[in-house]
Image: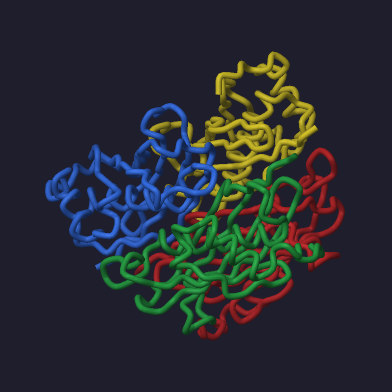
Chain colours: A blue, B green, C red, D yellow
Amino acid sequence: MSTPIDPEMTHAALNAFLRAEFPQVAERLALSDVRAMGVSLRLHVGPAQLRPGGTVSGPAMFELADVAAYLAVLSQIGPVALAVTTSASIDFMRKPAAEIDMIATADLLKLGKTLAVVDVKVFSENDMNRLIARASLTYSIPVY
Amino acid sequence: MSTPIDPEMTHAALNAFLRAEFPQVAERLALSDVRAMGVSLRLHVGPAQLRPGGTVSGPAMFELADVAAYLAVLSQIGPVALAVTTSASIDFMRKPAAEIDMIATADLLKLGKTLAVVDVKVFSENDMNRLIARASLTYSIPVY
Amino acid sequence: MSTPIDPEMTHAALNAFLRAEFPQVAERLALSDVRAMGVSLRLHVGPAQLRPGGTVSGPAMFELADVAAYLAVLSQIGPVALAVTTSASIDFMRKPAAEIDMIATADLLKLGKTLAVVDVKVFSENDMNRLIARASLTYSIPVY
Amino acid sequence: MSTPIDPEMTHAALNAFLRAEFPQVAERLALSDVRAMGVSLRLHVGPAQLRPGGTVSGPAMFELADVAAYLAVLSQIGPVALAVTTSASIDFMRKPAAEIDMIATADLLKLGKTLAVVDVKVFSENDMNRLIARASLTYSIPVY
């Protein structure tokens, strides 16, 4: 777990990748931090993410977690690899505020030759001490 | 598991609920079947659901599974209950075709007083024999 | 998903493998059926599997599910491969009777080059219509 | 998440509970720490926990995680409540050494009225920086 960050996938490179390859989500998701083995991603909460009762939808949080985890993997293995999500489990623990942006922190727990496992914690931006949701996602890394 | 379908949540009632309460997703999701302990839901695959390489995104499939499971629960307990997803696990097993609608079949495995567990299978519409993804979702049902 | 059963892993071969390689569990687990893409395994419920209140422990059911899934994978790829469980999710839905043997049915949902996904359903033997637990297990298959 | 530890469930009380109620596992599991919102539990690795190739079995790690999580819940709600595991997901990330005891740290992520969610990390005792497995377990707390 001591691999240094691929210099091609700095904050700027990952951000450019996000905007080029995921135009469908780039207007609502913004990379806020790139660390040694992880990234932080922000979800701009708008009407499309809300559900009755004034809360953020589960699928919107899942998308935030999945893209954050994917970027954490790419930050290490570079943009060429076609990693795909193979499994995910998520616990929704608290109701997020409806009009506050959300932050996901994604950290690599394992980066093997064929599998990566990523831990994702999801918070409302104004309270980074109260976990809203927590996910574990597994990515299959193609063998060349 | 022998509870009859709540007559207030027939196909028409569930469909009206989906359109009224989930306007954000009602243009891409359509209820196609309501059974004794389950429902089928269709995802209209459009550009917003695609990812690089011409495949349907994981979060789009998660949303399909989550809404299908939620409607399966509501078909039994009625529209008033504020059930919320508490946990979900999903396995993505095959790459779906990019331009084919997807179908989720959601079946109640357990309907308890405080928890419901729903099994969801996701297919491309043109091949209902090849599982694309499979999910298990748990809903917390409020105690009054 | 049409691969025929490896003739080296018939019921007798799988059973011999279970007894030789898993002597720690072979006295409580017995292979009861080998199908085209799955197996059934029986757990003999004894005092070591019980918990306070007269029910079968979750870990005992997890072991039953894990060994059943592993044998389902080996029935297809043969006994030499060192497949390892990489992830598992399980829902415990009903309380099993304390003195009834349990049956797990394990079916391959996907058998890829590097990953296999197995669905496992767990029942009390006297009621194969009421699901006690349901699991999804993923195995990593070594690439040679 | 600021509830103090129930004074009836100190280290000594939890340990006594473990030995009285789980005699089947008390000879291989030992409580090593009780914290504000969590516990640490040790698995003595013996022949019954091993698998071919000299590694600790997945079900042995699952049992360690499940009992640790259960004790973390009871340390807060006291010994009378009949909490039951309703779902669990676990990622097995590295092969543990065969002859080293294992340690699970279980921390409450949520303690609600009817559901508790616990994060569990599993290590080999001689390397608490390398995660062997990570689990998320949900317990249903009876409503009185």
The residue at the far top in this view is D7
Considering only vertical position in the picture, is D122 above or below B115?
above
Considering only vertical position in the picture, is A14 above or below C111?
above
Considering only vertical position in the picture, is D115 above or below C15?
above
Q: Is residue A110 left or right of residue C84?
A: left
Q: Nearer the viewer, residue D99 or B46?
A: B46
Q: Nearer the viewer, residue C95 or B59?
A: B59
Q: Quadrant of residue D2?
A: top right
Mark yes or no: residue B4 visible.
Answer: yes
Q: Is residue A82 left or right of residue A134?
A: left
For image coordinates 70% across by 25% down, the residue present is D77
For image coordinates 74% across by 57% down, the residue present is C132
Q: Quadrant of residue A102?
A: top left
For image coordinates 48% across by 67% down, the residue present is B29
Q: Nearer the viewer, residue C45 or A63?
A: A63
Q: Nearer the viewer, residue B95 or C49?
A: B95
**Image location (x, y in percent) of residue A78:** 19, 54
**Image location (x, y in percent) of residue A50:** 45, 48
Mark yes or no: residue C59 visible.
Answer: no
**Image location (x, y in percent) of residue B120:** 58, 65
Q: Is residue B130 left or right of residue A84?
A: right
For image coordinates 56% across by 70% down, the residue present is B31
**Image location (x, y in percent) of residue D35:** 56, 20
Considering only vertical position in the picture, is C28 above or below B53?
above
User: In which quadrant is the C terminus of chain C drawn?
Assistant: bottom left
